[in-house]
Image: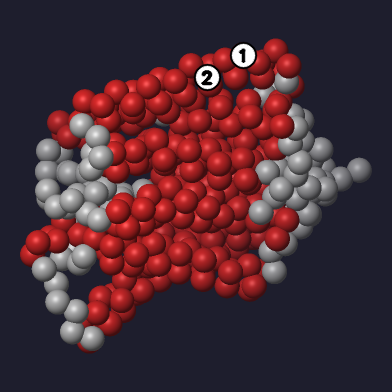
Amino acid sequence: MPSSEQALTPPCCPGAASSDRNGRRQLRRTSNGLGFFLFCCVMTHLTVTQLLYQFLNSIGYEKSFLYAGYSYLHPTLYFLLAGATMTVSFLVPGLLYLLVTRMPLGRVLPSDKVAPTLWIALFATGLCLAMLSNLPANWVSGWVQSLLPQMQSFSLLAMDGYGISPPLTAILLYLIHSTILPAFFEEFIFRGILLGQLRRWGDGLAIFISAFLFGLFHSNLQQIPFAFLVGLVLGFLVVRTNNLWLSIAIHFANNTIASFPDAAKFFLSDELALLIYNLLFYGVIVLGAVAALYLVWRHRSFFLPRPLPCQPLSLPSRILAWTTAPGMWLIVIYRVLAILFPWV
């Protein structure tokens, strides 16, 4: 009989090693590749951004101080370029990674059928947990501001036009850029590729690593705890349902609620916009709490620990393999520097 570290991989995650040494080597190689893949996404984003701005300069596009809040570009053009850059920087490296690694599409975009009532209840509960994740995020934000008052919240998603009202087309492009695109591409990258590749070494570690890197990929210290907690929730739901579209839907709904104040201020008074936002925020929490009670009542087994058929590597061995991958060190150090020095 093989030992626990020599057991075969669970059928849902084929391909793990049959020995501790080979298993660590495979996990380190996979983590290394994922780290360089994420770094490639970042470099692609920076490169495409520079190329687009150089193209505008080459054709004689005249920037205006009137649009200083939009990098001196017309708001419509600004959000059009931002959306195009996000699409290229995630989609192109992602497709290349799938091509090179021959990762099965079913592992990247899992789409198992989920009963409608269960899907709705999980959606409401997941969105509720995303809203509640704002509480520790706000605490960390206040702590960071008191400790490092020079650290400001930099966000490319805000309609920060310094008093300039953008046209309707710019607002629509902003909503696409802040809701639809990140909901799909970030789930495709973090809960599709990363989580899908790492699950063969255990769902728990895969959820944690994907959530940790998801948090680091957000813009500032204030957003990291929120993104990390949401990443844990979404990763858990993807693992338990094997359905990425549920996490995409929750991600989209969360971003839509978060983007509402920025877009609504051009159509509604501040008081009315705040009232609607609060109704949405607390309404989601109430509905989510009801949905969670329903899940505990009808689908209690969904949340209970599930014994794994086998585990080829011990947890210390897996952590050691992940933390010694050069690619992971590269992307973590780069993102930490980008967070601490966003003006560079």
Image location (x, y in percent) of residue 155: 27, 49
Between 161 and 195, the residue placed more toward the observer is 161
Q: Residues within 10 Å of mark 2 (few under 14, many from 20)?
A: some
Front residue of this view, candidates 214 and 25: 214
- Residue farthest to the bottom, as pictured: 58
Mark 2 and mark 1 lie on one chain; the one further toward the N terminus is 2
Image quadrant containing the C terminus: bottom left
Q: Secondary structure at mark 1?
A: helix
Q: According to the image, label 1 marks what residue?
A: 293
Amino acid type at circle 2 is Leu
- Which residue in the protein does label 2 denote? 287
Q: Residue at x 33, y 67 (%)?
A: 81
Quarter of the image for residue 104 reads bottom right
Q: Give the residue drawn at x 70%, y 28%.
A: 118
| In the image, farthest residue toward the left | 65
Give the mark toward the camera: 2 or 1: 2
Alpha carbons under labels 2 and 1: distance apart: 10 Å
Left or right placement of residue 200 versus residue 309 in this view = left
Check the image and report above or below for 285 versus 204. Answer: above
State which quarter of the image contains the N terminus.
Answer: top right
* Colour convention of the picture: secondary structure
Asked whether 315 or 134 is in front, the reply is 134
Q: Residue at coordinates 42% horizontally, 41% vertically from top-left?
A: 255
> What amino acid is found at the position of numbered circle 1 in the picture?
Leu
Dot 2 falls on a residue whose secondary structure is: helix
Q: Residue at 66% of width from left, 19% of height from top?
A: 295
